[in-house]
Image (tube, rainbow, N blue to C red):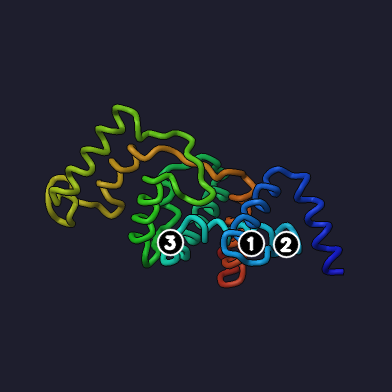
Amino acid sequence: QDFDRRMACLNLVVQVPVLLTLLINMLASAESQRKPPPLPRNQSSLYDLAAQATLLRICKPADMKNVRLVLDHVAYRNHCKKRKVFDYTHVREALGKFPNAKEMKLLWRRLSASHSIPFIKVVVDMAETRTSRAARKLWHKLHESGAFKHGHGRYSLTKDGAGDSLHDYANGQYQFMHLSIQEYLASKVFLRLLKSRPSSVKL
């Protein structure tokens, strides 16, 4: 029965381009690690395996947990807002009051700068426009001068971060590579909330 279930899953996967892409990514990761490739039991396990494989391929081991948390919560926030395209301001909103939100925001910026955020594609790349280059240059100049230190200078950080506003503008817009990936990641947050704080979940 388990074998039949896995074969039925594979039969579905090869007919759906996004699922086939996930499967190929998962198999390539297994091959690079010289491990036997796992066979997904169902569509949900395919997303689980592909997500893990993608994070292993792209992220440093120390970053994997935080990258996954950021992606999950950005996806959940986008899903709640019925939003596909988003920018860095939406990332900050999604992180909310996480204890290590500052660390995760810095991680997003670092990965964004190298265009290496898993499952994310750049919809509008502001990096090469004249205005965004000026905004980015000003952001770095003010940051290096210490103007963004709390309580110092005209551009001191507010609660949300005045410096972030300049960085946001220069950072473009993003989208998950496929809506089903956003829905999968959002579902993980939904299930965690349903388990820990069921009253906070609105169906």
The residues tagged by marks 1 and 3 sit, at their Cα atoms, a distance apart of: 18 Å
The residue that appears at 46% across and 58% down in the rendered structure is 59
Q: Which mark is residue 124?
A: none
Disc number at residue 60? 3
The residue drawn where x is 15% and y is 56% is 151
Tell me which residue sits at (27%, 38%) in the image. Answer: 136
Residue type, numbered disc 3: Lys
Q: Secondary structure at mark 3?
A: loop
Amino acid type, callout 2: Pro
In the picture, which quadrant includes the C terminus? Answer: bottom right
Residue 149 horizontal/vertical position (percent): 17, 55
Looking at the image, is 112 positioned above or below residue 57?
A: above
Q: Can you say whether 145 is above or below 50 in the image? A: above
Residue that extends furthest to the front in the rendered view of this protein: 34
Count of marks placed on residues? 3
Q: Which numbered marker is on residue 49? A: 1
User: Where, quadrant-wise, is the N terminus in this rendering?
Assistant: bottom right
**Front one among 29 and 132:** 29
42 or 77, nearer to the observer: 42
Marks 2 and 1: in contact by CB < 8 Å? yes
- Which residue corresponds to mark 2? 40
Pointer 1 local density, CA inside 10 Å: few below 14, some 14–19, many at least 20: some
Question: In x, y percent, where is residue 118?
Answer: 51, 51
Amino acid under label 1? Leu
